[in-house]
Amino acid sequence: MAFRVEIAPQAFDDIDGIAAYITEKSSFTVAERWFHGVIDDIGSLKDMPARYPATPESEELGLEVRLLLHGRKNRAFRIYYTFDYETPLSGTVRVLHVRHWARRPLSGDQFPFLL
């Protein structure tokens, strides 16, 4: 069984904004490649979403939010997500937010706006 992956409207807006920025600074082709890569990484969460670490902010929230990194070194993006089990082998993954690694990590008080 696999998990169902849902991308929250905020995360779609994040991805769209990042792709627009890449298009502006580089090219549509580079932005398209980035977009497909991030969507593929998000799609990979359908199998074993627990393989990535929980964020430190999870303790403040009382909700386990996990972090998937997309890209490498100074081009990495943080993908924040949570998941729940319907059965031991299936459930729902919800992608909450995507941001560049150089931006400050989300604080615990910013997460409720994403949920």
Image (cartoon, grey):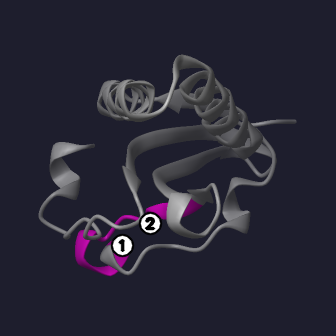
Q: Nearer the viewer, residue 3 or 114?
A: 114
Is residue 93 found inside the magenta-colored segment of the image? no
Q: How many marks?
A: 2
Task: Report the side of 73 relative to 106 (left or right).
Answer: right
The percent coordinates of residue 19 (x first, y second) are: 44, 28
Is residue 76 something one can see in this rendering?
A: no
- The image shows residue 18, relative to residue 74, as above or below, that is above
Magenta stretch bounds: 58-68
Question: Which residue appears at 43% of the width and 74% of the height?
Answer: 55
Task: Indicate the position of residue 103 as horizontal and vertical percent values.
Answer: 28, 64
Q: Please, what secondary structure does the residue beneath circle 1 have?
A: helix
Q: Which mark is residue 64?
A: 2
Q: In this view, does 29 lie to the left or right of 63?
A: right
Hey, what amino acid is under mark 1? Answer: Ser
The image position of residue 46, as x and y in percent, is: 74, 39
> Which label's residue is closer to the chain start, 2 or 1?
1
Q: Residue 58 carries which label?
A: 1
Give yes or no for contact between labels 2 and 1 (Cβ–Cβ under 8 Å): yes
Tag 2: amino acid: Glu
Coordinates of residue 89 in the picture (x, y in percent): 81, 47
Q: Quick one: 56 or 101, which is closer to the camera?
A: 101
In the displayed structure image, the side of residue 27 where residue 90 appears, left or right: right
In the image shown, does 1 or 98 lie closer to the viewer?
98
In the displayed orientation, state which residue is furthest to the right: 1
